[in-house]
Image (cartoon, rainbow, N blue to C red):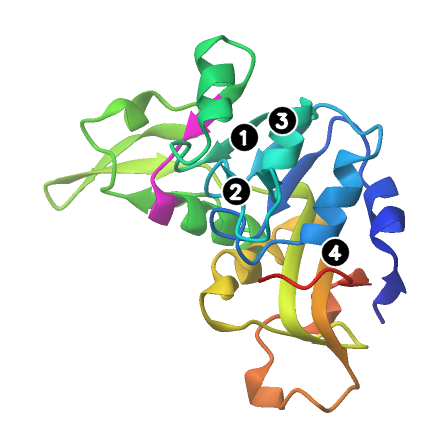
Amino acid sequence: MAKIITAEEAAKLIPSGSTVMFGGFVACGCAHDVIDAMSKSDVQNITGIMNDSAKQDGPDGSAYYGWAKLIHSGQMSGYIGSHMGTNPEASERWAAGNFKVDLVPQGSLAEMIRAGGMGLGGVITPTGVGTIVEDSPYTQGKMNIDGRDYLVMKPLRADVALISGEKVDKMGNVWYKGTTRNFSPYMAMAADLVIVEAVNLVEVGEIAPEDVVTPGILVDYIVVREKKEK
């Protein structure tokens, strides 16, 4: 059964040097309270796995939205993702050689995380053939199937996954609202430690079985959000 803890306690579970998966899209739908607690902690040298570099001037009025806080503070040393144009600071740090970014196509990223969670050896995809993706450290080579070239992409796993659910029951079962689901179900399968931030904590049974997307058996800790996302 998942244990309910505070955001500050969750941040302390993430050691320096960790690889952390962040569920969310441009930080919408991410674990805001835990990330904020991380930004106030002494954790350093985090490698992120997420879609993008988030953004400055978030819809909640924050100067740095979601994991953009960790980029701004220098606590995140780089990430594996698909986009970085939403956060000028991340681009500037990357251009200056102070921030490592490994870009892979978005669909490939999702499948690489899923492969990591499923214990598969990799992903075979035509996306990126003939582009700089062929030179990515996460591309294991090229193969030809029935006359078509494919890239072999490595599976991705992490030390920690930080996800957020609209409804989370006290067993850790998660229901996501709309597109906040994004990468989170895959990430919950592909990390050694899974922390879910509950927008609303409910009793067991309040989420219909057919609505459970991430089963509680995958979740180690629950944090109840105090700051509601706009």
C-alpha distance separating marks 1 and 2:
7 Å
Residue marked by disc 1: 79
C-alpha distance separating marks 1 and 3:
13 Å
Type of amino acid at the residue the image marks with label 1 = Tyr
Q: Quick one: SS at disc 2?
A: loop
Question: Which dot marks residue 72?
Answer: 3
Q: Quadrant of the N terminus?
A: bottom right
The x and y percentages for residue 47 are 63, 30
Disc with the residue nearer the chain's start (1 vs 2)? 2
Q: Is residue 161 above or below residue 143?
A: below
Q: Residue at x 25, y 34 (%)?
A: 128
Residue marked by disc 2: 50
Disc with the residue nearer the chain's start (1 vs 3)? 3
Disc with the residue nearer the chain's start (4 vs 3)? 3
Q: Residues within 10 Å of mark 1 (few under 14, many from 20)?
A: many
The x and y percentages for residue 168 are 71, 74
Disc with the residue nearer the chain's start (1 vs 4)? 1
C-alpha distance separating marks 4 and 3:
23 Å
The magenta stretch spans residue 59: no
- Disc 1 and disc 2 in contact, CB within 8 angstroms: yes
The magenta stretch spans residue 103: yes
